[in-house]
Image (spheres, grey):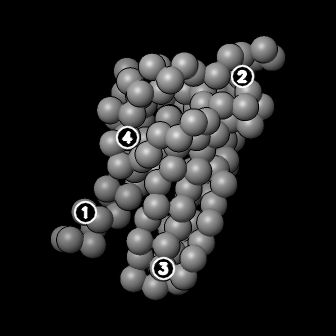
Amino acid sequence: MKLTEQTAKPLAKGTAPLTRKEAEEFMHEIPKWSLGDREIIREFRFKDFHEAVQFVNNVAEIVNEQDHHPDILISYDKVRLTFSTHKINGLSMNDFIVAAIIDQLVDQQQTVKAA
Protein backbone atom coordinates (compact mmCIF):
# COMPACT_ATOMS: atom_id res chain seq x y z
CA MET A 1 0.00 0.00 0.00
CA LYS A 2 1.32 3.45 -0.93
CA LEU A 3 2.26 5.84 1.87
CA THR A 4 -0.43 8.33 0.80
CA GLU A 5 -3.10 5.65 1.30
CA GLN A 6 -2.17 5.17 4.95
CA THR A 7 -2.86 7.07 8.15
CA ALA A 8 -0.42 7.87 10.94
CA LYS A 9 -1.08 5.71 13.97
CA PRO A 10 -0.16 6.09 17.64
CA LEU A 11 2.99 4.17 18.53
CA ALA A 12 3.04 1.55 21.22
CA LYS A 13 5.39 2.08 24.12
CA GLY A 14 8.78 0.58 23.35
CA THR A 15 8.43 0.84 19.56
CA ALA A 16 11.86 0.88 17.95
CA PRO A 17 12.76 3.49 15.36
CA LEU A 18 13.11 2.36 11.76
CA THR A 19 16.49 1.03 10.78
CA ARG A 20 18.55 2.99 8.26
CA LYS A 21 17.77 0.33 5.64
CA GLU A 22 14.02 0.54 6.31
CA ALA A 23 14.14 4.34 6.10
CA GLU A 24 16.07 4.21 2.83
CA GLU A 25 13.39 1.95 1.34
CA PHE A 26 10.65 4.47 2.17
CA MET A 27 12.71 7.31 0.67
CA HIS A 28 11.83 5.97 -2.79
CA GLU A 29 8.27 7.21 -2.23
CA ILE A 30 9.39 10.67 -1.10
CA PRO A 31 12.43 11.40 -3.30
CA LYS A 32 12.39 15.16 -2.71
CA TRP A 33 13.10 14.68 1.00
CA SER A 34 16.56 14.24 2.50
CA LEU A 35 17.33 11.49 4.97
CA GLY A 36 19.31 12.53 8.03
CA ASP A 37 20.44 10.45 10.98
CA ARG A 38 17.09 10.56 12.77
CA GLU A 39 14.95 12.77 10.56
CA ILE A 40 13.69 13.54 7.08
CA ILE A 41 13.85 17.10 5.79
CA ARG A 42 12.45 19.01 2.84
CA GLU A 43 12.69 22.68 1.95
CA PHE A 44 9.99 24.39 -0.10
CA ARG A 45 10.31 27.74 -1.92
CA PHE A 46 7.51 30.20 -2.58
CA LYS A 47 6.94 33.50 -4.31
CA ASP A 48 6.84 35.40 -1.02
CA PHE A 49 6.19 35.22 2.71
CA HIS A 50 2.41 35.20 2.25
CA GLU A 51 2.52 32.07 0.07
CA ALA A 52 4.92 30.42 2.52
CA VAL A 53 2.53 31.03 5.41
CA GLN A 54 -0.45 29.79 3.38
CA PHE A 55 1.48 26.58 2.74
CA VAL A 56 2.25 26.20 6.45
CA ASN A 57 -1.44 26.65 7.25
CA ASN A 58 -2.31 23.89 4.75
CA VAL A 59 0.35 21.66 6.27
CA ALA A 60 -1.04 22.40 9.74
CA GLU A 61 -4.43 21.00 8.71
CA ILE A 62 -2.86 17.79 7.42
CA VAL A 63 -0.60 17.21 10.39
CA ASN A 64 -3.39 17.90 12.85
CA GLU A 65 -5.60 15.36 11.05
CA GLN A 66 -2.75 12.84 11.19
CA ASP A 67 -1.77 13.85 14.75
CA HIS A 68 1.87 13.84 13.70
CA HIS A 69 3.65 17.19 13.62
CA PRO A 70 6.91 18.36 12.04
CA ASP A 71 9.31 21.03 13.14
CA ILE A 72 8.61 24.01 10.87
CA LEU A 73 11.01 26.81 9.98
CA ILE A 74 9.75 29.76 7.91
CA SER A 75 12.32 32.09 6.37
CA TYR A 76 10.54 34.64 4.17
CA ASP A 77 9.96 32.62 0.96
CA LYS A 78 11.23 29.27 2.29
CA VAL A 79 9.70 26.65 4.54
CA ARG A 80 11.70 23.76 5.95
CA LEU A 81 9.83 20.77 7.36
CA THR A 82 11.63 18.26 9.54
CA PHE A 83 9.97 15.04 10.61
CA SER A 84 11.25 12.83 13.39
CA THR A 85 9.27 10.85 15.93
CA HIS A 86 10.46 12.35 19.19
CA LYS A 87 8.74 9.64 21.24
CA ILE A 88 11.15 7.03 19.84
CA ASN A 89 14.10 9.36 19.13
CA GLY A 90 14.17 8.43 15.46
CA LEU A 91 12.09 7.79 12.39
CA SER A 92 8.78 5.96 12.31
CA MET A 93 6.44 5.00 9.53
CA ASN A 94 4.34 8.04 10.55
CA ASP A 95 7.09 10.42 9.42
CA PHE A 96 7.05 8.95 5.92
CA ILE A 97 3.26 8.77 5.69
CA VAL A 98 2.77 12.43 6.56
CA ALA A 99 5.67 13.55 4.34
CA ALA A 100 4.09 11.69 1.39
CA ILE A 101 0.70 13.28 2.07
CA ILE A 102 2.33 16.73 2.12
CA ASP A 103 4.07 15.95 -1.19
CA GLN A 104 0.69 15.01 -2.63
CA LEU A 105 -0.71 18.38 -1.49
CA VAL A 106 2.21 20.21 -3.15
CA ASP A 107 1.73 18.26 -6.39
CA GLN A 108 -1.99 19.11 -6.41
CA GLN A 109 -1.33 22.81 -5.78
CA GLN A 110 1.24 22.96 -8.58
CA THR A 111 -1.24 21.29 -10.92
CA VAL A 112 -3.85 23.92 -10.08
CA LYS A 113 -1.35 26.78 -10.59
CA ALA A 114 -0.27 25.36 -13.96
CA ALA A 115 -3.85 25.01 -15.24
| Quarter of the image where the N terminus is located | top left
Disc with the residue nearer the chain's start (3 vs 1): 3
What secondary structure is marked by label 3? Answer: loop
- Quarter of the image where one finds residue 65: top right
Q: In the rendered image, which residue does mark 1 sit on? A: 111
| Amino acid on which disc 3 is placed | Asp
Question: Which numbered disc, 2 or 3, marks the residue that appears first in the sequence?
Answer: 2
The percent coordinates of residue 28 (x first, y second) are: 32, 32
Mark 2 to mark 4: distance in Å?
Answer: 22 Å
Distance from the alpha carbon under mark 2 to that under mark 3: 34 Å
Judge whether 71 appears above or below 54 on screen: above
Task: Return the x and y of residue 30 as percentages of the image width and height.
Answer: 37, 40
Which residue type carries mark 1?
Thr
Q: Residue at x 19, y 71 (%)?
A: 115
Q: Is residue 85 above or below residue 41?
A: above
Q: CA distance from mark 4 to mark 3?
A: 22 Å
Tell me which numbered mark, 4 or 3, is placed earlier along the sequence: 4
Q: Circle 4 sits in a helix, a strand or a loop, which is it?
A: loop
Side of 47 relative to 99 (left or right): left
Q: Is residue 103 left or right of residue 107?
A: right
Q: Label 2 amino acid? A: Leu
Which residue matches tag 3? 77
Q: Nearer the viewer, mark 4 or mark 1?
A: 4
